[in-house]
Image (cartoon, rainbow, N blue to C red):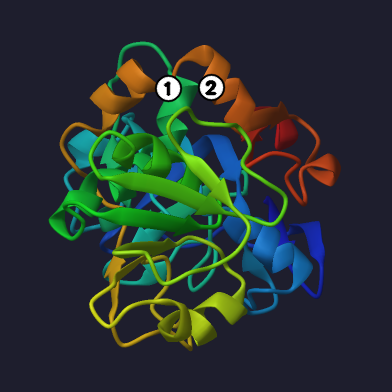
Amino acid sequence: MKAVVFNLGITISDVPEKQVNRDYVLLKPKRVLVNGLENSIYVGLLWVDPTRILGSTGIGRIEGVGLDIDKSLEGKLVLVLPYSQTYGGIGTEIDGILAEKASVPLDSIVILPQYGFNEKYILYPYVSFALQLPKYIHSGNTLIIGSGLYGIISALYLKDMVSKVAVYREDGINPKIVGVEEIRHFSQEWDNIIITTFRSWIRAFIDDISKSNTKIVMPKLMNTWPVVSSTKTVFIPPKEVDGVLEFIDKKINDKLFNELVSFSNDLLVSFPSPKAGVVINAEEIFK
């Protein structure tokens, strides 16, 4: 089968079909989201094993299940999260879903509504992360470092919950969010810092630009990354969370969705993604 793999570069290759492990499902991807994680692999900020199939997040339909899984899942439309709590990062530590068919762990999928097809639900992991933030962040001034999809959606969610939300990114915030500031220089005024960038310098120096009681939060996307981080850091994995689909339906309108992501049937123009993400039509690419 054809798949998008990392092999000292990103290429489309013929690879053997993957076996379906006991606690895995086999699915046919419909849409795959290329985002900051794949961009980081492309530019060399994040290393994965050669021949790794990429694709951390997407929507697909289950075609088969492993021996330990209820066969009633076959035919279901599902969202693939970028992290399995059992096996690690999808498309990083284990093979991803940018392929004709993909085999992923059961604990990395969320069953979607079976009626209709809503491409916006591909944002599920980012909203899941944001909706878990109040467990750790209740008030105070909050700085988000990096404004990819995790940063933008976290800012959108927190801006009415805490005293102040600001985003640090060298090339500015895109899109602009009413009620969210953009900063260019660091200070130690922050009660909470959310790190969503893959660049390592900020993790190495975060203790120097934070107070002793500053809460530091990052998304949990891999078991082996990051190598360097503050001992104060709390890692939140994207997972199935109540209220995610409702948030997407109410807060992510068509205008905002189209500002966040672009759409492509061409892999060559999707790396690196020109916006915070690119939704790839896997059905067209691999047909």
Residue 256, disc: 2
| Drawn side of residue 77 relative to residue 60, left or right | left
Residue 184, disc: none
- Residue 272 pos. (x, y %): 76, 51
Residue at figure coordinates x 39%, y 46% from the top left: 165
The amino acid at mark 2 is Leu
| Drawn side of residue 55 relative to residue 106, left or right | right
Q: Which of these two is toward me, 1 or 165?
A: 165
Q: Which of these two is toward me, 111 or 180?
A: 180
The C terminus - image quarter = top right
Crowd band around label 1 with a 10 angstrom C-alpha radius: few (<14), some (14–19), many (20+): some
The amino acid at mark 1 is Ile
Residue located beneath label 1 in the image: 252
In the image, is residue 119 above or below residue 69? Answer: above
Residue at figure coordinates x 81%, y 59% from the top left: 11
Marks 1 and 2 in Cβ contact (< 8 Å): yes
Q: Secondary structure at mark 2?
A: helix
- Residue 210 pos. (x, y %): 39, 76
Crowd band around label 2 with a 10 angstrom C-alpha radius: few (<14), some (14–19), many (20+): few
Residue at figure coordinates x 25%, y 45% from the top left: 162
